[in-house]
Amino acid sequence: MAYETFAFVYDEVMDDSLYQQWLSFSLRHLPKTTNQVLELACGTGALAVEFAKNGFDVTGLDLSEEMLTLASDRALQEDLSINWIAGDMLDLTDIGKYQAVTCFSDSLCYMQDATQVKQVFEGVYQLLEDSGTFIFDVHSTYQIDEVFPEYSFHDQTEDFAFLWDSYRGDSMHSIEHFLTFFVKKDGEMFERFDELHKERTYPIELYQQMLTETGFKTEVFADFSDEAPNEKSKRWFFVCQK
């Protein structure tokens, strides 16, 4: 699993301000009557905890048990009750019905192809209550094709070092992120881990087509705002109604 090692330094390298932006966007676009949300690819639970703090009944689903362990600890520290599910968003059967579903941090870009993306859409549609809301974000084609290639980010603390380098992928609108971690073990010794993360996105029109075929009515926004995307938008947000 790609996040096995990443889970333990994930919170250190993530920009905390993004969680508040995802929360703010959700609060603006979820119907005011919504009090229950399923967060797909919830990671270490930072956003799930923020939803719970705002009064939502929250369920978080993630493929990584390491991530969910950290998420559970986070909720306990905040004295919050959140339901955690170890599961794959390609199979959303038998996990209940929900008023709203979110999937942020470009998690859908980790699907192998458009067929899998649509499979997630169909699974979400089935578990949403009537008139339920599905909100997700993905990288734009501009972000994947123009911004990410040759991107390089390096960070370090006393306990770990993190190197992130990105290169064009083999498929259209795809990118490969090469991640290297040096994690302190005992004393001054560090252990090295390497991971490869592959992401892929598609034109807005294809997302809209797949969502319409699934049964959703959809609006598209950009970069955490309520503005329509333009040619240099980096992140697209889809607000979908069943």
Image: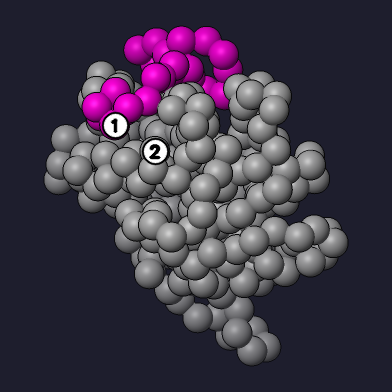
**At 34% from the left edge and 57% from the top edge, which residue is drawn?**
91
Residue 125's disc number:
2
Q: Is residue 217 magenta?
A: yes
Q: Nearer the viewer, residue 227 or 170?
A: 227
Q: What's the residue type where badge 2 is placed?
A: Tyr
Q: What's the residue type where badge 1 is placed?
A: Thr
* Residue 32 position (above or below residue 89): above
Give the secondary structure at mark 1.
helix
User: Which residue is disc 1 drawn over?
Assistant: 214
Residue numbers of the magenta segment: 210-232
**At 72% from the left edge and 69% from the top edge, which residue is drawn?**
73
Splitting the image into 4 quarters, where does residue 190 fall?
A: bottom right
Which quadrant is home to the C terminus?
top left
The percent position of residue 61, horizontal first and vertical second, equals 52, 58
Distance from Cα at disc 2 to Cα at disc 1: 7 Å
Is residue 125 visible in the rendered image? The answer is yes
Compare marks 2 and 1 and give the one earlier in the sequence: 2
Which quadrant is home to the N terminus?
bottom left
Circles 2, 1 touching at the beta carbon (< 8 Å): yes
Q: Nearer the viewer, residue 194 or 141?
A: 141
* Residue 157 position (above or below residue 108): below
The residue carrying pointer 2 sits among few (fewer than 14), some (14 to 19) or many (20 or more) residues within 10 Å by Cα, namely many
Q: How many marks?
A: 2
Q: Nearer the viewer, residue 71 or 157?
A: 71
Q: Is residue 21 magenta?
A: no
The percent position of residue 76, horizontal first and vertical second, equals 79, 66
